[in-house]
Every structure is written in C-alpha cells, then in structure tokens.
Image (cartoon, rainbow, N blue to C red):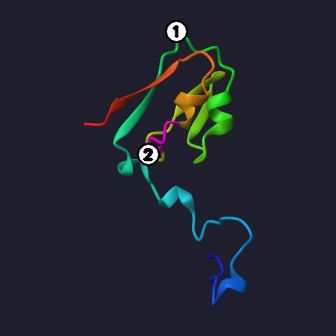
C-alpha cells in the first residue's frame, strides 16, 4: 500500500505533475474520440511516436510501435510527430 499524500496548500504542491496512484488502474482510453492507427507499410520503426507520447501508451513489440488503446487518449501528438506520416486517426465508434 502506498503512503497517502496530503496537499494542504500551494507550498505543498510538487514542482512537476505526479501520479497519486497506479496509472495501470486508470484506463483512460474511454476518454478518446479519435483513435490513432499505425500503417506498418509506411512505419520505419524510428520510435519518434514512442518518444513523444505524453501518456507512454506506445509500446515497442518486435521493434515496432504498438499503441495501447486502453490508455491512449487520442491526443494526436504521435500523428503530428511521425516523420513518415505512418499514423493517422479515425473517429472512435
């Protein structure tokens, strides 16, 4: 069990953002309305998408990026950063 963190005021706030619990419990993919899709024919495996993903929901499997849709919020940063235009977004249904 982790220690309870109490923030009483501005001076108690951390300098950087921090998690108050295990993020594996907080599946945020349901927030998404756009879903990224990787075109593996165009993908070179440069991993720039992995580097820039703010939620660390791009995993590396067999030297290729794989998006964990349980945690991806569909922000589109991976789409914008991909130098080979190998990632697009589709509307979530």
Q: How many marks?
A: 2
Question: How many C-alpha atoms fall within 10 Å of the one at disc 1: few (<14), some, or many (≥20)?
Answer: few
Q: Is 73 a magenta residue?
A: yes
* Residue with the mark numbered 2: 70
* Residue with the mark numbered 1: 41
- Where residue 88 appears, as percent x and y from the top left, is 45, 24
Asked if residue 28 lies left or right of residue 16, the reply is left
- Where residue 31 appears, as percent x and y from the top left, is 37, 51
Q: Which residues are magenta?
A: 72-76
Residue lying furthest left:
93
Where disc 2 sits, the SS reads loop
Q: Write the residue at 69% across / 21% down.
A: 46
- Where residue 19 appears, as percent x and y from the top left, is 61, 66
Q: Considering only vertical position in the picture, is 30 above or below 83?
A: below
Foreground disc of the pair 2, 1: 1
Q: Considering only vertical position in the picture, is 81 above or below 52?
A: above
Q: Write the residue at 61% across / 29% down.
A: 81
Where disc 1 sits, the SS reads loop
Q: CA distance from mark 2 to mark 1?
A: 24 Å
State which quadrant residue 23 falls in: bottom right
Residue lying furthest bottom:
8
Q: Which mark is residue 30?
A: none
What type of secondary structure mainly makes up the magenta span?
loop
Q: Write the residue at 52% across / 9% down.
A: 41
Tell which of 33 and 5 is nearer to you. Answer: 33
Assign the N terminus to one quadrant of the image: bottom right
Q: Is 68 a magenta residue?
A: no
- Where residue 36 appears, as percent x and y from the top left, is 44, 31
The first of marks 2 and 1 along the sequence is: 1
């Amino acid at each position: 069990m982790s220690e309870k963190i109490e923030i009483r005021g501005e001076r108690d706030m951390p300098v950087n953002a921090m998690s108050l619990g295990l993020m594996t419990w907080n599946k945020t993919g349901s927030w998404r309305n756009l879903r990224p899709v990787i075109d593996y024919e165009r993908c070179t495996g440069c991993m720039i998408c992995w580097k820039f993903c703010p939620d660390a929901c791009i995993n590396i499997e067999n030297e290729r990026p794989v998006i964990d849709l349980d945690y991806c919020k569909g922000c589109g940063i991976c789409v914008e950063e991909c130098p080979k235009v190998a990632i697009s977004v589709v509307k979530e249904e």
